[in-house]
Image (cartoon, coloured by chain):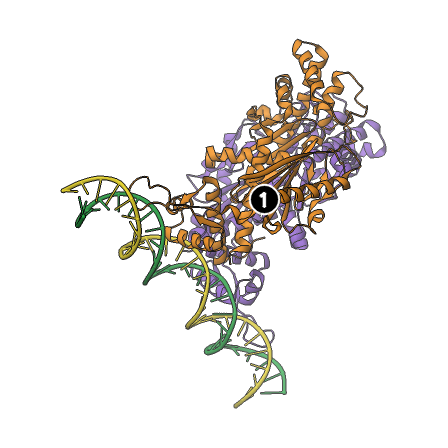
Chain colours: A purple, B orange, C green, D yellow
DNA sequence: GATTTTTTTCTCGACAGTCGAGAAATTTAG
DNA sequence: CTAAATTTCTCGACTGTCGAGAAAAAAATC
C-alpha cells in the first residue's frame, strides 16, 4: 500500500542519510558529506546544525590544517548520545557487550549458561540480571540505553522480539519484549545469529562491489545448522531473512531430529547427526543433546585416515546440506554461499557431498555451481552484524523521534 | 543503499498515489481522492490540474447531481492516454489483448502455437507478427502503446525481460527486449504466469483484509507446476517472486523429469508424471511432452473408482507437492496456499498426499497446517495480474517521465 | 421566487525543504 | 602584505504541502 509523502519526510530521510554516511565513513567534513550524499552544501548545513542542536553529532576538535584554505571542521556522532547493549546467546554462554553511539565497545563479559532444559524462565531471569550488571559496571544511566540487540540460534518472529523455537528451549517461546519492558524503556530487537552473519557479509560485499552486489547466503555449521540470506531490495537497502533451514525437510521419514520430526537437514548435518551415523546408531534413536567437539574431531581424523564409515557420515551430511542449498536456490536465485561456524573445520570432508548434493538439482545443472567460500571468525561477524543493524535502527529512531 | 530525497520526489510519489487510488476505485471526485490519499484538498487540486494539463486524467461529464450541494466533478484516467498489450503465452496458444489506459479491453485474439521444438526463433517471429496484427486491427498509433506485458510459464530473469528456461523451449533463452526493440519503443516486461496469479490473489486479499494481509502463495497445477509468492514488503507495497518450484529437487536420484534432471517435483506432480506412474512405466523413461487432459481424466476416474495404482499415482504427486510446499514454508513463513490451474480438478485425489507431505516437516508440525484453498479461473487471474502490474508500471513511468 | 443550507471545489498565504550562487572565513604561497 | 585556494555559511528563488476560508452550485425552506 502506497502512502503519502511530505516535505518533512524528505528531511527525515535526508537526515538519516547523513547519519548513515557518517557511520560508514567515520568523521567527515561538510564537503565530504555533501559529496557522499549528493545533497547540496546548503542542505548539509541545515541538517548538521539541526543534528548538532539536538546533541546527536558534534564538531570535532580543530585538527592541524593539512593543505591550504579554510581548515575543515569534521563532524562526528556524539559518543554519549546513546548506548547499545548487544546480547549474543550461544549454546554454552551469553555474551553481553556495551557499545556507544559511535560503535565503540565499552565493556564486555560472558556468563556461562546452565543447561537446565526446563530453564526458559530461569534463563530470562539470568538475562535480566546480566543486563543490569553491565549497566551497573558502566555507570551509565538506564535511559541512555536506546537499544538492546539480542541474537540466538533458532527461529525468530519477524516482527516482534520473540524467540519462537530454539535448539535449547524447543517450542518454549521467549518473548524478550515483555520480559524486559518493565525494567527497560529501550527498544528490544532479536535476530537469528546466522542472519546477522549474512548481514555483515552482505555489508562487506557492498563496500567492495557497490551496486554490483546482489545477494548472498551464509550457512552456519555446528551443533545446529543455520542459514541467513541477504538480498538487495528493489530500492530500500537490503533485505535479510533467516529461514528455518536446519529443520527444512531433507528426506521424508528420514532420521530422527532433536526437534522430534523426522528427516530434517539437521538430522543429517548437525554435529550429533554426524556422530550418530559415524557410530552406526540407528537413525531413529533419540540423539544426544550436546556433543563435545573433541569427539567429532576424532571421527574426522578417522575419516581423513580413510576409514569408510566415518567418511560416509560426513558425506551424508554434505549431501543433506547440498540438497537443501539447491532447494533454497530454486526458491530464490543464484547466489554465493559463505560457510561459517565451527563445522568449517570439517569442510574438507563435507565438500564433496555438498557439491554432489547441489549438482543433483535442475537449477545448479542449468546455472552452474554457486560460488562457495569458507569464512572463519563467525563470532566477529555476528558482532559486526549486530552493530550494522542496531546502529542504523538507532539512527532512524533518533531522527524520527528526537529531532523536532 | 540509501539515496537522497527531494521535494520533487514528494510530488512524484503523491502523483503516483493519486493515480493508484483512481485505478483502484474508478472515477473519483476531488474530495474522495483526498479522503483515500490523506492528502489535503489543496494538494489534490495542484496534482490533478497538473495531471489534467498533461492529458493523463480528465474531468468526466456532468452527471445528474445526487444530493444537494455543489455537484461533484469526477476525475478519471483518459482512456486514450496510452495503451497496453498483454501477451499470454500458454502451452498451446498465444493470446494477445489490447487494453486502454483505464484497463478496458479493446481487442483480443488467440493464435495457435506450432509445437515445433526447434522453433524459438520462429516463435519470436510469430509474437512480433501477432503484436503488429493487434496494433493494425485497432488503428492505434504505435507510439501510443506504452507497455507490452508478457507472461509465460518457466523461469524469468528478475531484472530483464528474458525467458531463461521454459517447458517448451528449454534453455533456449528468449530475450524479448532485444527481439522487440527495433520495432517498438514501448517498455517490455515479462513475468512468470503463476507470479501474476499470486499478484492478483494478493491484490484481492489486500482489498478485503487491508493491512492485515501478510503473504500468500499460488500453486498452479498442470502439465508443469508453478509457484508464485506474494509478500507485503516492509514499506514499499508488495513483493512478488516466482521461484523455480516445479524443478526444485523433490528426491535425489528420483524420477526423470522433462528438463533432463532427476527428482524434480514436476517429475512426480506434472500431468505427464502422474500418467507415467499410473501406467507403471519405469521412472527413468523419458516422459511424453504433452498429455491430453482426457487421458488424465480417465486415470482420475479409475482412481475414484478405487483402483489402487492410479490412486497411488495421484497420492505420490500430492506427496511431492506437499514436501515441496513444506520446504518453501521453511524458507519463508507460514502463509495460505491457493491452488489453481487445470490440475485443481483432481484436487480430491491429491489432497491427502499434499497434506501428508506437508505434515512430514518440522515447520508444519510446529505451526500447524497452512490454509489451503482451491481457486478456479486461472486464466482470469493471470489477466488480472497483468493489468494490476502493467497499469501501475505505466502510471509510474508516465509520472516520472511525462509530467514536467 | 428569494433566501438559507449544504456540499464541493478552488485559491491564498504560511510554512518546510532543497538548491545554486556568492559572501565570509581562514590558511598557505609568494 | 597580498593573492590564491579551500571550506563553510547565508541568502533568495523555487517547489511542495497544508489549513482556512472564499467561491460555486444545487437542494431545501420560507
Front residue of B138/A236: it is: B138
Q: Is residue B371 left or right of residue B353?
A: left
Looking at the rendered structure, the secondary structure element under dot 1 is strand
Q: Chain of mark 1?
A: B
Q: Is residue B69 above or below residue B263?
A: below
Q: Is residue B249 above or below residue B390?
A: above
User: Quarter of the image holding residue A169?
Assistant: top right
Quadrant showing the C terminus of chain A: bottom left
Which percent across, then down, holds residue A197? Answer: 63, 44
Which percent across, then down, holds residue A332? Answer: 66, 38
Which percent across, then down, holds residue B360? Answer: 64, 22
Q: Is any atom of residue A334 visible in this view?
A: no
Residue at position x 55%, y 59% in the image: A22
User: Quarter of the image holding residue B366?
Assistant: top right
The residue carrying pointer 1 sits among few (fewer than 14), some (14 to 19) or many (20 or more) residues within 10 Å by Cα, namely many
**Residue under label 1:** B84
Front residue of B64/A99: it is: B64
Q: Is residue B256 left or right of residue A159?
A: right
Q: Is any atom of residue A351 visible in this view?
A: yes
Q: How many marks?
A: 1
Which percent across, then down, holds residue A54? Answer: 43, 58
Q: Is residue D2 above or below residue A224?
A: below
Amino acid at each position: 500500500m502506497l502512502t503519502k509523502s511530505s516535505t518533512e519526510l524528505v528531511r527525515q530521510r535526508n537526515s538519516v542519510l547523513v547519519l548513515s554516511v557518517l557511520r560508514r565513513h567515520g568523521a567527515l567534513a561538510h564537503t565530504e558529506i555533501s559529496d557522499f550524499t549528493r545533497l547540496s552544501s546548503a542542505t548539509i548545513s541545515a541538517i548538521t546544525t539541526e543534528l548538532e542542536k539536538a546533541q546527536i553529532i558534534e564538531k570535532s576538535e580543530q585538527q592541524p590544517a593539512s593543505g591550504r584554505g579554510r581548515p575543515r571542521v569534521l563532524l562526528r556522532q556524539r559518543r554519549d548520545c546513546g548506548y547499545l547493549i548487544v546480547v549474543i546467546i550461544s549454546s554454552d554462554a551469553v555474551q553481553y557487550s556495551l557499545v556507544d553511539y559511535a560503535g565503540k565497545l565499552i565493556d564486555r563479559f560472558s556468563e556461562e549458561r546452565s543447561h537446565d532444559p526446563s530453564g526458559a524462565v530461569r534463563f530470562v531471569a539470568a538475562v535480566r540480571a546480566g543486563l543490569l550488571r553491565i549497566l551497573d559496571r558502566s555507570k551509565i544511566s538506564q535511559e541512555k540505553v536506546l537499544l538492546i540487540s539480542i541474537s540466538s540460534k533458532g527461529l525468530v518472529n519477524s516482527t516482534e522480539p520473540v524467540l519462537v523455537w530454539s535448539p535449547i528451549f524447543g517450542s518454549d517461546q521467549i518473548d524478550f519484549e515483555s520480559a524486559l519492558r518493565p525494567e527497560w524503556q529501550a527498544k528490544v530487537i532479536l535476530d537469528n545469529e546466522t542472519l546477522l552473519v549474512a548481514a555483515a557479509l552482505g555489508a562487506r560485499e557492498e563496500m567492495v562491489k557497490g551496486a554490483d552486489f546482489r545477494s548472498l547466503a551464509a550457512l552456519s555449521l555446528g551443533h545446529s545448522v543455520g542459514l541467513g540470506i541477504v538480498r538487495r531490495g528493489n530500492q530500500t537497502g537490503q533485505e535479510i531473512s533467516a529461514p528455518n533451514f536446519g529443520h527444512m525437510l531433507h528426506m521424508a521419514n528420514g532420521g530422527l531430529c532433536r526437534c522430534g520430526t523426522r528427516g530434517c537437514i539437521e538430522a543429517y548435518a548437525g554435529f550429533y547427526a554426524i556422530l550418530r551415523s559415524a557410530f552406526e546408531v540407528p537413525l531413529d534413536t533419540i540423539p544426544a543433546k550436546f556433543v563435545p567437539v573433541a569427539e567429532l574431531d576424532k571421527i574426522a581424523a578417522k575419516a581423513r585416515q580413510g576409514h569408510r564409515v566415518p567418511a560416509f557420515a560426513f558425506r551424508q551430511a554434505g549431501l543433506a546440506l547440498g540438497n537443501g542449498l539447491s532447494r533454497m536456490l530454486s526458491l530464490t536465485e543464484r547466489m554465493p554461499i559463505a560457510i561459517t561456524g565451527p563445522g568449517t573445520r570439517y569442510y574438507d570432508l563435507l565438500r564433496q557431498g555438498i557439491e554432489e548434493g547441489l549438482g543433483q538439482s535442475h537449477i545448479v545443472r542449468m546455472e552452474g555451481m554457486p560460488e562457495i567460500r569458507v569464512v572463519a571468525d563467525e563470532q566477529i561477524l555476528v558482532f559486526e552484524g549486530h552493530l550494522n543493524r542496531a546502529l542504523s535502527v538507532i539512527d532512524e529512531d533518533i531522527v524520527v523521534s528526537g529531532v523536532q
